[in-house]
Amino acid sequence: MERILKYKVGVSEIVASMLLLLIILAIGSFLYLYLYQRAFYQQQVVSQEITEEEFKVQQQLTILFAVGSSLDNKVTIIFATGPVGVKVYSIYVNNTLVEGFSSSTYNPTGVYNITVTSPITLVSDSHIIVRIVFEGGIADAWGEVA
């Protein structure tokens, strides 16, 4: 019996415990670093989105006056910008896109006059709805056709 026990090789309980502890620490460290990196990335994404939205909120555009002319089928729009410059993407008349208008950037705190060709036929003594789509949102106004 002594002979069988003599050749049996094993790992002591202390060494086994140390190895198990090292494995657990390695897995825990990996999980911690992975989750920390994911949380940091998400924080950066959210921070960037908040900054973009704050910038968009500061952009203001108000349509002061809109009038259409049935004689030459033109729409004149007068609008004012807020404390931050505004990029206008498109203009709609009665929910129809104005063709030929290219995106333009307007300086802050200014009043601007735009005349565009109406995409629809304007009828005298009727109303139109003018919509300007800009980087910070949408501005709508009613206008009359003369």
Image: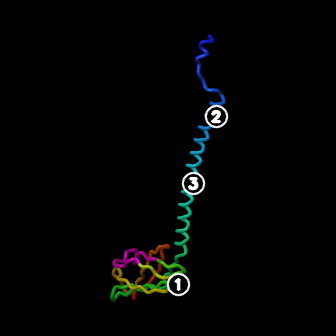
Visible residue check, residue 142? yes
Q: Which residues are magenta?
A: 87-103
Observer-side mark, 3 or 2, equals 2
Taking the image as shown, residue 101 lies to the left or right of residue 36, namely left
Q: Nearer the viewer, residue 67 or 25?
A: 25
The quadrant in which residue 4 appears is top right
Q: Quick one: label 2 or label 1, which is nearer the N terminus?
A: 2
The correct choice, above or below, for 6 with respect to 128 in the image is above
Residue 49: percent from left, percent from top: 53, 64
Give the image location of residue 3, x and y in percent. 60, 12
Q: Amino acid at mark 1?
A: Thr
Residue 144 visible, this angle: no
In the depicted view, which residue is nearer to us: 44 or 121?
Answer: 44
| Numbered circles on residues, count | 3
Who's the residue at 44% across and 79% down the image?
105
User: Where, by quadrant of the figure, is residue 122 drawn?
Assistant: bottom left
Crowding at mark 2 (Cα within 10 Å: few <14, some 14-19, many 20+): few
Q: Is residue 130 found left or right of 47 in the rendered image?
A: left
Q: For the residues carrying marks 1 and 3, which lies nearer the camera in this image?
A: 3
Give the mark nearer the N terminus: 3 vs 2: 2
Q: Which residue is mark 2?
A: 18
Q: Residue 136: image x %, image y %?
A: 50, 73
> Which residue is label 1 attached to?
109
The disc labelled 2 sits on which kind of residue? Met
**In terms of secondary structure, where does tag 1 sit?**
loop
In this image, 27 relative to 106: left or right?
A: right
Mark 3, residue position: 39
- Would residue 98 be counted in the magenta stretch? yes
Q: Secondary structure at mark 3?
A: helix
